[in-house]
Image (tube, grey):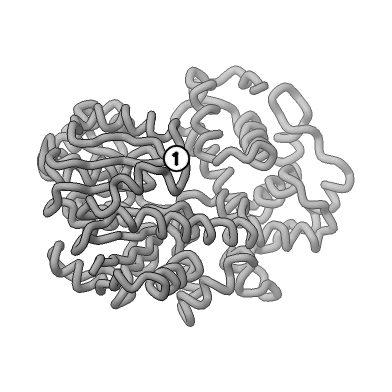
Amino acid sequence: MMNEPEVKSAYGLGRAARLNLAYEILEELGSSGRPLDGIMASRFKHMADALERRDRRDLEGRVRSVLLHYRRLLWWLKRSKQKPSVRALLLADMVLNEKTDLDQLQKLCNGARNRMDMLTKEEIQALKFLMKKDINSPDMSEAILVECPDWAEKGLREVFGLKFAEEMAAMNKKPPTDFRVNTLIKPRDEVMASLAEQGVKTEPTPYSPIGLRLVDAGGPVLGETTAFREGCLEPQDEGSQLISLLVGANKCKHVVDFCAGAGGKTLALAAEMKNGGQLVACDVHGKRLQRAKVRLKRAGIVNTERRQLDNTYDKWIKKNKGKFDRVLIDAPCSGTGTWRRNMDSKWSKDETDVEELVVVQQDILKSASRLAKKGGRVIYATCSLLPEENEEQITKFLAENDTFKLLKAKDVWQELMEGDCPSSHEDYFRLSPLQSGCDGFFGAILEKI
């Protein structure tokens, strides 16, 4: 059960209460298996009357710092002879990154209501060892310095080569906040002007013609803006927007979003189709499709059918074989490309998870591709950068299916978009935070011969 916060001052919660709350959030993250954004959202909702904006920023920053420096903190804990724990990680982060001295920590951790327990003798001894140390040490391996998990190092080195360290450093930086404009309601420039009138400053995204990037959030929160209430925009990373645009749905009558989830890309596809034709949003998870229903209604979408599948080889697929112009497969994946946005996922997966995902991806690609008609396209996409989830999947699929051919991503870009293609690969569509400024994505465009 969540603790009640200490009485807030005119400036929100006290520092000690915020530290204790960060500890509780990290403890819940480690024990519940829930994603961090869900935990934070429920905590903030529960404590809405007690938390100021500065409290939320401080909590997010403190929790993010522990996850951002996780491997390096573990390295230092081992040398200070401390057993790894959420408490040990949090206290070490305070010393190594915030340079908090021992007297301050003892005042913050005094065992009072809504404060962390008093420091033990063992903790004091270990923290003294860490004082005046830097979070980075020349004795650390490169993988530890750039916060790369062991299970992902081989694959990411294969993709990034000599730029491995640079790419990983970019994946550790705070991501921008991007929005996709719902052009069914208003064009991008009008939405940008509307947000500016309410104190929310944005700018056009570099590559997506339907995207806005937050510059200054000095006004109301997004949900309170006129543009959001009218359904004019949705939070969506620019890379995700580009994947949707590469589908080329604006030229099609029949499109299926096979792994639609809560409908982020479905909304983009519907807008590209100008609310016409047939768009089917499929998923095996009914709750996700239910969330999509709300978003579709708010955006004024009327051309979309939501269909829950019993399994990957649902009989509906066989009945609709060869009927669709475009099949988007936003496959479930390890999410390595979104680590800067979902840092907790970096430390919650391992090799076994990836092996299981690879099998699921193969089945989805094999089944969903049957929906494409002759001359139609299958767009396979992930928010992963690991070759076993991306290039190797396509190579295997093409070796077993001679009725499909790979279209070069840069050729498809020139066919559908203006300007230079941001992809770092000729044949595939590959984005990364370092090279394109958005989350890491992979896309392959396959055409049925």
Judge whether 349 appears above or below 17 on screen: below
**Quadrant location of the N terminus in the rendered image:** top right
Circle 1: element type: loop
Judge whether 436 appears above or below 178 on screen: below
Q: Is residue 304 visible?
A: yes
Q: Amino acid at mark 1?
A: Val
Judge whether 173 appears above or below 167 on screen: above
**Residue at the image point whose x is 23% and y is 69% from the top:** 449
Q: Is residue 202 visible?
A: no
Q: Where's residue 67, x and y in %?
A: 59, 51
Q: Where's residue 114, x and y in %?
A: 69, 25
Residue at the far bottom in the pictured view: 162
Foreground pick, 282 / 322: 322
Residue labelled with disc 1: 284
Which quadrant of the figure has residue 110? Answer: top right
**Residue at the image point whose x is 80% and y is 63% from the top:** 79
